[in-house]
Amino acid sequence: MPYSYMEHASDVGIHAEGETIGKAFESGAEAMLNVMFDLSTIRPTVDVTFSAEAGDEALLFVEVLNEILSIQDRHSLAVKRLEAVEIKQTGSGLSFIGRIYGEPFNPEKHAVKTEVKAATYSGLSCVAVDGKYILECVVDV
Protein backbone atom coordinates (compact mmCIF):
# COMPACT_ATOMS: atom_id res chain seq x y z
CA MET A 1 0.00 0.00 0.00
CA PRO A 2 1.52 3.35 -1.01
CA TYR A 3 -0.06 5.16 1.93
CA SER A 4 -0.65 4.80 5.64
CA TYR A 5 -2.19 6.77 8.46
CA MET A 6 -0.46 8.53 11.33
CA GLU A 7 -1.84 8.91 14.83
CA HIS A 8 -3.48 12.23 15.55
CA ALA A 9 -5.51 13.35 18.57
CA SER A 10 -8.65 14.40 16.70
CA ASP A 11 -8.03 14.24 12.93
CA VAL A 12 -6.33 11.87 10.48
CA GLY A 13 -2.67 12.06 9.47
CA ILE A 14 -1.83 10.92 5.95
CA HIS A 15 1.55 9.51 4.90
CA ALA A 16 1.81 8.94 1.13
CA GLU A 17 4.67 7.65 -1.00
CA GLY A 18 5.44 7.42 -4.70
CA GLU A 19 8.32 6.86 -7.10
CA THR A 20 7.46 10.27 -8.59
CA ILE A 21 5.88 13.33 -7.02
CA GLY A 22 2.79 12.66 -9.15
CA LYS A 23 2.47 9.10 -7.81
CA ALA A 24 2.85 10.41 -4.26
CA PHE A 25 0.00 12.88 -4.91
CA GLU A 26 -2.13 10.01 -6.24
CA SER A 27 -1.38 7.91 -3.14
CA GLY A 28 -2.19 10.82 -0.83
CA ALA A 29 -5.50 11.44 -2.58
CA GLU A 30 -6.38 7.76 -2.31
CA ALA A 31 -5.57 7.84 1.41
CA MET A 32 -7.89 10.81 1.93
CA LEU A 33 -10.68 9.31 -0.18
CA ASN A 34 -10.37 5.99 1.64
CA VAL A 35 -11.05 7.80 4.92
CA MET A 36 -14.36 8.91 3.42
CA PHE A 37 -15.60 5.92 1.43
CA ASP A 38 -15.20 2.20 0.85
CA LEU A 39 -13.43 2.78 -2.47
CA SER A 40 -14.42 -0.68 -3.76
CA THR A 41 -18.03 0.56 -4.01
CA ILE A 42 -17.15 3.38 -6.44
CA ARG A 43 -17.13 2.81 -10.20
CA PRO A 44 -15.12 5.39 -12.17
CA THR A 45 -17.86 6.41 -14.63
CA VAL A 46 -17.28 10.19 -14.42
CA ASP A 47 -14.04 12.14 -14.71
CA VAL A 48 -13.29 15.78 -13.99
CA THR A 49 -10.09 17.57 -15.00
CA PHE A 50 -8.85 20.38 -12.73
CA SER A 51 -5.81 22.50 -12.00
CA ALA A 52 -4.13 23.96 -8.94
CA GLU A 53 -1.12 26.16 -8.19
CA ALA A 54 1.13 26.70 -5.19
CA GLY A 55 4.61 27.79 -4.21
CA ASP A 56 6.09 24.32 -3.57
CA GLU A 57 5.25 20.60 -3.61
CA ALA A 58 3.94 20.43 -0.05
CA LEU A 59 1.64 23.44 -0.45
CA LEU A 60 0.49 22.08 -3.81
CA PHE A 61 -0.43 18.77 -2.15
CA VAL A 62 -2.84 20.55 0.22
CA GLU A 63 -4.28 22.62 -2.65
CA VAL A 64 -4.90 19.49 -4.73
CA LEU A 65 -6.55 17.57 -1.89
CA ASN A 66 -8.81 20.54 -1.10
CA GLU A 67 -9.73 20.97 -4.76
CA ILE A 68 -10.74 17.28 -4.90
CA LEU A 69 -13.01 17.83 -1.90
CA SER A 70 -14.48 20.95 -3.50
CA ILE A 71 -15.19 19.24 -6.84
CA GLN A 72 -16.63 16.22 -5.06
CA ASP A 73 -19.02 18.49 -3.17
CA ARG A 74 -19.95 20.76 -6.10
CA HIS A 75 -20.68 17.84 -8.44
CA SER A 76 -22.12 15.50 -5.79
CA LEU A 77 -19.59 12.78 -6.56
CA ALA A 78 -18.06 9.84 -4.79
CA VAL A 79 -14.44 10.04 -5.97
CA LYS A 80 -12.37 6.88 -6.27
CA ARG A 81 -8.97 8.11 -7.48
CA LEU A 82 -6.75 10.90 -8.76
CA GLU A 83 -4.58 10.84 -11.86
CA ALA A 84 -1.73 13.38 -11.74
CA VAL A 85 -1.53 14.44 -15.39
CA GLU A 86 1.14 17.14 -15.15
CA ILE A 87 3.15 18.95 -12.49
CA LYS A 88 5.43 21.67 -13.77
CA GLN A 89 7.49 24.58 -12.57
CA THR A 90 6.05 28.05 -13.18
CA GLY A 91 7.47 31.50 -12.53
CA SER A 92 5.86 31.60 -9.10
CA GLY A 93 6.01 27.95 -8.04
CA LEU A 94 4.28 24.86 -9.38
CA SER A 95 1.17 24.11 -11.37
CA PHE A 96 -0.79 20.86 -11.29
CA ILE A 97 -3.20 19.39 -13.79
CA GLY A 98 -5.09 16.34 -12.62
CA ARG A 99 -8.13 14.24 -13.28
CA ILE A 100 -10.38 12.63 -10.70
CA TYR A 101 -12.52 9.58 -11.36
CA GLY A 102 -15.70 8.62 -9.58
CA GLU A 103 -19.45 8.41 -9.94
CA PRO A 104 -22.51 10.32 -8.78
CA PHE A 105 -22.86 10.01 -5.02
CA ASN A 106 -25.57 7.57 -3.94
CA PRO A 107 -26.03 7.39 -0.14
CA GLU A 108 -27.39 3.84 -0.40
CA LYS A 109 -24.29 2.65 -2.26
CA HIS A 110 -21.60 5.00 -0.93
CA ALA A 111 -22.00 5.10 2.82
CA VAL A 112 -19.70 7.84 4.12
CA LYS A 113 -17.28 6.40 6.68
CA THR A 114 -15.93 9.74 7.92
CA GLU A 115 -16.44 13.17 6.43
CA VAL A 116 -13.22 14.94 5.52
CA LYS A 117 -13.73 18.70 5.78
CA ALA A 118 -10.31 19.84 4.52
CA ALA A 119 -6.66 19.04 4.08
CA THR A 120 -4.61 21.20 6.44
CA TYR A 121 -1.08 22.54 6.76
CA SER A 122 -0.68 20.68 10.05
CA GLY A 123 2.13 18.14 9.84
CA LEU A 124 2.74 19.16 6.23
CA SER A 125 5.93 17.89 4.64
CA CYS A 126 7.35 16.75 1.32
CA VAL A 127 10.71 14.97 1.16
CA ALA A 128 12.57 12.83 -1.33
CA VAL A 129 14.21 9.80 0.31
CA ASP A 130 15.87 6.80 -1.33
CA GLY A 131 14.36 7.47 -4.75
CA LYS A 132 10.80 8.09 -3.58
CA TYR A 133 8.72 11.07 -2.60
CA ILE A 134 7.00 11.16 0.78
CA LEU A 135 4.10 13.53 1.47
CA GLU A 136 2.43 14.03 4.84
CA CYS A 137 -0.41 16.18 6.08
CA VAL A 138 -3.38 16.08 8.43
CA VAL A 139 -6.95 16.06 7.14
CA ASP A 140 -9.65 17.65 9.26
CA VAL A 141 -12.49 15.20 9.93
Image (spheres, rainbow, N blue to C red):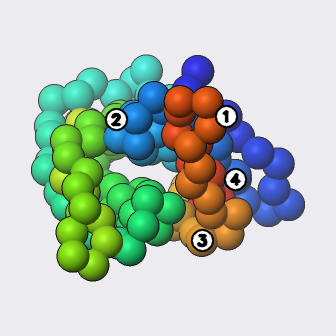
Place residue 140 in its image quadrant: bottom right
Q: Is residue 133 left or right of residue 102?
A: right
Task: Estimate the x, y position of residue 85 in percent, counting from the top left.
Answer: 19, 41
- Residue, disc 4: 12
Residue at left 27%, top 41%? 84
Q: Earlier in the sequence, mark 3 or mark 4?
A: 4
Q: Residue at x 15, y 48 (%)?
A: 48
Q: Which mark is residue 104?
A: none
**Of label 2 and label 1, which has the lower sequence position?**
1
Percent of width and height locating residue 47: 15, 40
Which residue position is annotated with label 2?
81
Q: Which residue is mark 3?
A: 121
Say which element carries label 1.
Answer: strand
Q: CA distance from mark 3 to mark 4?
A: 12 Å
Question: Is residue 99 toward the left or the right of residue 128 in the image?
Answer: left
Camera-near label (2 vs 1) is 1
